[in-house]
Amino acid sequence: MDDDSQNEINKYRKFKKVDGATYRKVNQFLRKRTYITAREWALARLCTDFRTAGGAEMTFIGKHLPELVPFMEEPYSPQAVNQARHSFKKKVRKASATFFYGAMCGFFTTDELDDLLFEASEVSRFLLEVEGTTLDIDEEIDIEDRITRVMRSVGETAKTILTQRTDSTLADKTSPQKQSSEETDTQDPDASHNYLTDITSENAPPFLPNAKGVNTSIPTEDSKGKNKFRNQK
């Protein structure tokens, strides 16, 4: 190993709080609270930290993976590193779509969305703390404020849309020949067909069973903390 590579490894001091923990235990902890695996967590972090102008240094990351992350037991090929990075991005996108649907369909109240955001931020902070990533307090507050404003807007807009649709449905019952021009203009038959094809196709992926996790403590929410998102302006 050349001196530059060894220096890079020596300077990388993350994931030290889980030094001595097995991959299985870290994986169980993550699967209990998130959709990502320990492999995806570690490699997404490394791809961010070792990102260059031309992309992440996947060869270096994979070759020195056990030296960089205590709970990773063997080296990875560049292809395996890229696969884990892609899987992480894919899961984040799916989780985002699920969360936004829950907010927009009216299932949660605005206050319940605040609670969800608080819980998500607590878990995220804890993961950052465990891996050893520091975030400037002003940057952290700014991120939370922006997310809160967006989600409150989504909740209020969803409430308005659902009310309008209910009123429109009632109007259609009294006037069967009436068709909403707004609904006709905004629908995309091709897009709907594509989604339905994904659902009904014989090649659609099977549903995966939930992973069993173990109890691992995280910072406890207090009564003041739970109102954090509501009180921030």
Image (tube, rainbow, N blue to C red):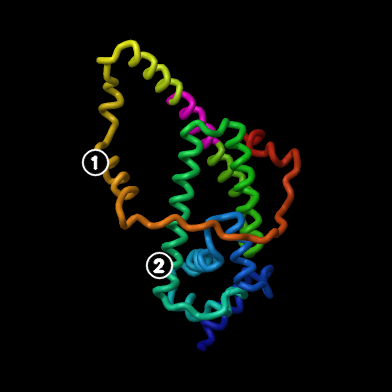
> Which image quadrant: the C terminus?
top right
Residue 100: image tag: none
Of discs 1 and 2, which sits in the foreground? Answer: 1
Residue 39 picture location, percent across and down: 53, 68
Q: Is residue 30 magenta?
A: no
Give the residues in magenta. Answer: 149-161
Farthest residue, direction bottom: 1
Closer to the camera, 182 or 225? 182
Residue type highlighted by circle 2:
Gly
Q: Which residue is mark 1?
A: 190
Q: CA distance from mark 1 to mark 2?
A: 35 Å
Is most of the magenta stretch helix, strand or loop?
helix
Closer to the camera, 65 or 190? 190
User: Can you tell which quarter of the image residue 30 is in?
Assistant: bottom right
Residue 55: image tag: 2
Residue 57 picture location, percent across and down: 44, 73
Above or below, 194 against 86 in this view is above
Crowding at dot 2, Cα within 10 Å, few <14 / some 14-19 / many 20+, comes out as few
Residue positioned 61% across, 70% down in the render: 24
Residue positioned 67% across, 72% down in the render: 21
Residue type highlighted by circle 1:
Asp
Residue 89 picture location, percent across and down: 44, 58
